[in-house]
Amino acid sequence: MKNKIPASIDETLELLSGADYIADRAIATVVFLSLKMGRPLFLEGEAGVGKTEIAKVLAKALGKRLIRLQCYEGLDISSAVYEWNYSRQMIAIRMAEAEGPREASDLESHIYDETFLIKRPLLQALEGDAPVLLIDELDRTDEAFEAYLLEVLSEYQISIPELGTIKAKNPPIVIITSNRTREVHDALKRRCLYHWVGYPSAERELEIVKIRQPDVSDRLAREVVSFVHALRQSDLFKLPGVAETIDWVSALHELDAISLDPQTVNDTLGVLLKYQDDIAKMEGSEAKRMLDQIKSEIAALG
């Protein structure tokens, strides 16, 4: 199904699962609609729940180039869109001067062409055969950059004063993610289809673990997923995401663990939790209590 946009929600589910992304029907529906309608997809949710992975999976499954713009505080046009290669322009000016006098307009047209243009992710995404453009963690930027994105997302075009307007012949597939550290403006959200990506059910997370770590024992996988879901019911500063679940399973597998025990949990909590206050709250007697309860529930289920 490479390079072919799925024709239904079921085909979208198949497309995602074929690239090892275990999606529920709600995610598959909004991805399908985004592809069919040609609208950007805005994915919001906690860190580590698989938002970024959707863009990677789509690029892989559709056989398209993935262009990623990682957002951060202070991101500007020169880093996100384009900038002129001033050093090369200066060399060109010196060479032109050495050849003899030239009209200012002639010199300007010479140095302001695409030869001297450094194309950043947003400009790259307007070229070629509809690549997947991932605008990752948009909430880390400021409102000024959001406002600039409106032109790109409305008309899939970018204005460069020295060159004019560059418009995409084949608009990119746009995935925007946000961890909701701040609210993104409504004007930008209105141009997108929206989906909240929450934590998966225990059953779906178990499927994800088994796909990502096929060598792990069924017993360990079930205990890990159950422990993580219990943690997500706790009062922690930062709850573990699916990414942390996979990392923990990988770490336990490297330690040749076949089942969880209190000592192993205490020794590896730093893989799962990223703040010392959370680790201090969970290690010791609390981790043992949770583990005993989980094992008792798993045993009752057979």
Image (tube, rainbow, N blue to C red):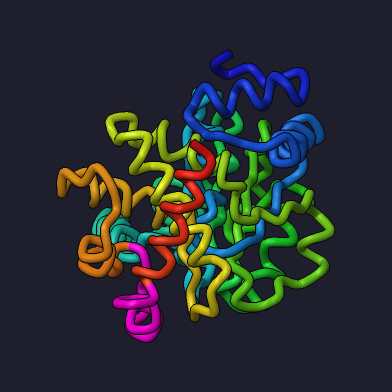
User: Per the image, is 185 magenta?
Assistant: no
Residue 196 visible, this angle: yes
In the image, residue 175 sits, relative to residue 71, either above or below, namely above
Residue 106 visible, this angle: no
In the image, residue 73 sits, relative to residue 249, either above or below, namely below
Which residue occupies the foreground of this view, 186 or 13? Answer: 13
Q: How many labels does the image show?
A: 0
Position of 70 with respect to 24 (left or right) is left
Name the spot of residue 247 as percent of width and height, x first. 32, 52
Q: Residue at x 64, y 45 (%)?
A: 174
Q: Residue at x 67, y 37 (%)?
A: 24
Magenta span: 272-286
Which residue occupies the foreground of this view, 180 or 111? Answer: 180
Which quadrant: the N terminus? top right
Q: Which residue is drawn at 56% across and 55% down?
A: 135
Question: What is the magenta segment's predominant secondary structure?
Answer: helix
User: Per the image, is 281 magenta?
Assistant: yes
Outermost residue, top direction? 1
Outermost residue, left direction? 255
In the image, residue 238 sits, relative to residue 135, either above or below, namely below
Name the spot of residue 159 as percent of width and height, x first. 66, 57
Which residue occupies the foreground of this view, 123 or 31? Answer: 31
Q: Which residue is drawn at 40% across and 61% down?
A: 292
Name the spot of residue 249 as percent of width and height, x first. 32, 48
Name the spot of residue 201 as percent of width and height, x first. 61, 47
